[in-house]
Image (cartoon, rainbow, N blue to C red):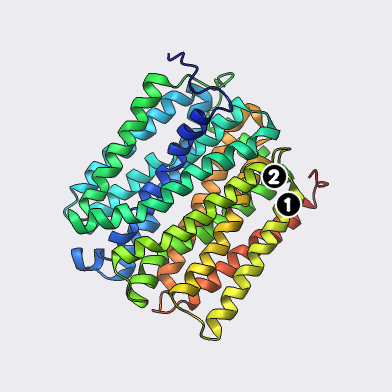
């Protein structure tokens, strides 16, 4: 087992490493987006069929959430991370060789199961190595790395698509995941304080899930942050069709759309890392959720009165990204802080909720797609409002602590 002190708690090296795990999600989704709009022409299919490469991916991501937390609590973080990275890599290379849309959809499903390790085990490692007051800062700093991945992924995807073809995006995926596996194998020490021999027993897992969902603190944060992720996946699934098909951007121009959005998230996460040094704050979290819901309400108004275009859509997502920089670290830290002994399982349950909401949101984009932005912005508003309402309702079951 590695004994390197390179990745000691609180170090920038640890932040960077966990950031690369967090970043495997944007690598798998955002880098693929420029190719998504091209799939109908490449495989001679309609738009809803092409969008299944995202909705099925999110279903696989939901399934993967069920695996990594309990396995990591039982066997350790290292083997679970290495196994997930290798599965992602193998599926990515299979996607690159896909001869049909059906094969690509299947490959994306398996790829997503591999992807799920990134957020689940990154959050669990942060909980393993840090006290609750330190967690929001660590999640926020790692999220800056993830945001930088989001910043460059669409542009890299567009360049690969134009220079080599859609398949080269998946080759990049495979190499990225292999690098993660090698680094963890050679240099990252095990972080779990104590293995739980009962963690992978189905009944014990269900009991753990039940205990978490009946905890008002966990439920309020986990449900609300998952609904906010639904806003994100609504955007990711709809963006290629809104910007490329409706607004006429080229794939390369579409990649540039993510620059101001990701930069905003990086700045917001950096600010969150400074203002959350004392730990999770229910009051601050609720305030940011309210700002998000208000912003999405304004987006609906702007679209309804005809103020829709490239700039409007970018401004909407900049507003979302600014709130996301606070919601992610506060939400995950608030949910995980009370449950250090089952951090992997708790992280799994959050990820499962997140993936289920994301998959449903992505599917709804395909169902209501009508070559206009109206269904998209209304879905933004619905999910943001639900996030705020359910957080407030669930928190009433226990006095606020922040």
Secondary element at tag 2: helix
| Residue hosting label 1 | 284
Q: Quadrant of the N terminus?
A: top left
Between the residue at mark 2 and the residue at mark 1, the CA separation in whole angstroms equals 10 Å
Can residue 203 be seen at all in this image of the molecule?
Answer: no
Q: Quadrant of residue 245?
A: bottom left
Percent across and percent down for residue 151 are 42, 53
Percent across and percent down for residue 231 are 53, 61
Percent across and percent down for residue 253 are 33, 66
What is the crowding at mark 2: few (fewer than 14 residues within 10 Å), some, or many (at least 20)? some
Name the residue at 64% across, 54% down: 224
| Residue hosting label 2 | 275
Name the residue at 64% across, 35% down: 135
Q: Are marks 2 and 1 in contact (CB under 8 Å)?
A: yes
Disc on the earlier residue, 2 or 1: 2
Name the residue at 53% across, 72% down: 377
User: How many numbered marks have been drawn onto this rendered protein structure?
Assistant: 2
Question: In the visual, does 248 lie left or right of 140?
Answer: left
Q: Quadrant of the C terminus?
A: top right
Farthest residue to the bottom: give it.
305
């Amino acid at each position: 087992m590695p004994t390197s002190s390179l990745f000691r708690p609180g170090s920038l090296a640890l932040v960077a490493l966990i950031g690369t795990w967090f970043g495997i999600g944007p690598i798998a989704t955002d880098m693929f987006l420029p190719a998504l709009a091209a799939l109908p022409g490449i495989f001679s299919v309609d738009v809803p069929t092409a969008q299944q490469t995202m909705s099925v991916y999110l279903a696989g991501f939901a399934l993967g959430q069920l695996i990594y937390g309990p396995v990591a609590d039982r066997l350790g973080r290292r083997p679970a991370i290495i196994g997930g990275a290798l599965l992602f890599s193998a599926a990515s290379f299979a996607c690159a060789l896909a001869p049909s849309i059906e094969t690509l959809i299947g490959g994306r499903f398996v790829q997503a199961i591999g992807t799920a390790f990134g957020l689940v085990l990154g959050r669990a490692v942060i909980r393993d190595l840090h006290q609750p007051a330190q967690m929001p800062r660590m999640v926020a700093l790692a999220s800056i790395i993830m945001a930088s991945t989001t910043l460059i992924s669409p542009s890299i995807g567009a360049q690969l698509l134009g220079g080599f073809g859609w398949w080269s995006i998946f080759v990049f995926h495979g190499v990225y995941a292999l690098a993660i596996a090698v680094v963890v194998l050679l240099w990252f020490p095990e972080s779990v304080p104590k293995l739980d021999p009962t963690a992978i027993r189905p009944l014990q897992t269900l009991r753990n899930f039940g205990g978490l969902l009946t905890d008002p603190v966990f439920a309020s944060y986990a449900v609300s942050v998952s609904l906010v992720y639904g806003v994100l996946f609504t955007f990711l699934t709809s963006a290629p069709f809104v910007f490329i098909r409706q607004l006429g951007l080229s794939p390369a121009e579409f990649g540039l759309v993510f620059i101001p959005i990701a930069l905003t998230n990086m700045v917001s996460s950096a600010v969150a890392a400074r203002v959350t040094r004392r730990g999770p704050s229910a009051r601050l979290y609720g305030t940011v959720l309210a700002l998000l819901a208000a912003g999405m309400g304004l987006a609906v108004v702007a679209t309804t009165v005809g103020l829709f275009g490239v700039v409007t859509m970018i401004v909407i997502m900049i507003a979302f990204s600014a709130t996301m920089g606070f919601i992610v670290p506060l939400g995950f830290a608030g949910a995980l802080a009370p449950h250090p002994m089952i951090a992997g399982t708790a992280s799994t349950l959050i990820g499962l909720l997140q993936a289920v909401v994301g998959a449903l949101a992505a599917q709804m984009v395909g169902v209501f797609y009508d070559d206009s932005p109206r269904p998209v912005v209304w879905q933004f508003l619905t999910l943001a409002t639900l996030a705020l309402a359910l957080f407030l309702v669930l928190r009433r079951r226990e006095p606020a602590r922040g």
